[in-house]
Image (cartoon, rainbow, N blue to C red):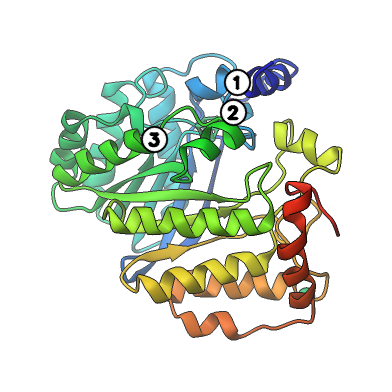
Amino acid sequence: MTLNSEVLNIRKLHRPKKEPLDKPAASWFGKDNIRGDIIDTLTIIFRTSGCYWGKQGGCTMCGYVYDSAFEIPTDEDILKQLDFAMSRADKKERIMVKIFTSGSFLDKSEISEYARNEILNRLYENEKVSYVLAETRPEFVTYEKALKCAEIMKDKPFEFAYGLETSNDFVRKNSINKGFSFEVFKRACKCAKKAGLYNKAYLLLKPPFLSEREAIEDMKKTIDDICEHNLAETVSMNLCNVQNKTFVEKMWERNEFRPPWLWSAVEILKYAKQKYPDLYIMSDPVGAGAKRGPRNCKECSFDVADMIRDFSITQDVKVLDRVNCDCKKTWEVVKSLDDFTFGSPIID
Ligand code: SF4
Ligand SMILES: [Zn+2]
């Protein structure tokens, strides 16, 4: 029995739904701070054949794999998905477009080379698009592919985003089952930089089997490693939530997993911004306050989540002192005790 076989057993019980192939899985507007420029962002989740890694098991916390298409979309379908999502931006003057596939933009089994280049061409030609980001697993990045993207985007800033999760290979393998090493991530970042592109790292706070304290230490060390090697300009910290039909959900149902405390995120954001003022570090605490989401107590969870979102936009560390609550004392106790339970909740 391996971690991957456990994840795969869960995957096998579920099939992607029959959804139209010419509409994206989802698209929505948000706000982002792009290296100092605060801008509306349009996130598009393309419906593709899906993440190759997720199809053979994949990451312990990932429910995105169920967004994949029930049959392989054509290039025309993919481009219609783009047009459909972009039509939502008609009334916007200036946007950033974030491309996600619940997999890899650079994996040609998900998005062909033709469709990839055409997506970028259309976004380059569209004057209201100021920045573009595309998520990919790092093993798909080569200097040639990065250069091709840079050639199409010319002076329009373009960045690759990677779900690195942690710089610790042991944790990435044994808690997350991510299937690539820190070296592979480093190589991808270097190729992108050499081609004139930016890099963004998505990190995961509190994967399974880590205590609250270990998770905080893992995240701080990861940020140190990224900054010391000068790999990414932006870091986005995802606070592990419990997604449907995942290994993490199985653990959570058995009371073996609790999502992280929001105070842990606050501690890390303060640490990172004070130590690396030039790093853009952000977090959107998805599902904050809910049973399946990151949370403090009932009284402060929503306010602390809003505080984290405001910090993400302003990058002003003073914002992180705006909310306080008595439950901070409980969180301090949890940090000192749940090492003994390997992250299983000692208190809800
Ligand atoms: S987290 Fe990303 S790499 Fe992992 S299975 Fe999900 S889509 Fe694939
Ligand atoms: Zn509280």
Please name the residue that numbered disc 2 is placed on: 65
The residues bearing labels 3 and 2 have C-alpha atoms spaced at a distance of 14 Å
For label 3, the SS is loop
Which amino acid, mark 1?
Gly
Label 2 within 8 A of ligand 1 by Cβ = yes
Rendered view: 323 above or below 297: below
Rendered view: 139 above or below 86: above
Total residue callouts: 3
Image x and y of residue 305, in percent: 65, 69
Image x and y of residue 96, in percent: 36, 56
The 10 Å Cα crowd at callout 2, few under 14, some 14 to 19, many 20 or more, is: many
Horizontal side of 215 relative to 90 (left or right) equals right
The quadrant holding residue 147 is: top left
Which of 29/270 is in front? 270
Please name the residue that numbered disc 1 is placed on: 57
Which amino acid, mark 2?
Val
Image x and y of residue 16, in percent: 65, 21
Rendered view: 293 above or below 302: above
Which of 292/335 is in front? 335
- Determine the residue positioned at 64% across, 37% down: 61
For label 1, the SS is loop
Contact? badges 1 and 3 (CB < 8 Å):
no
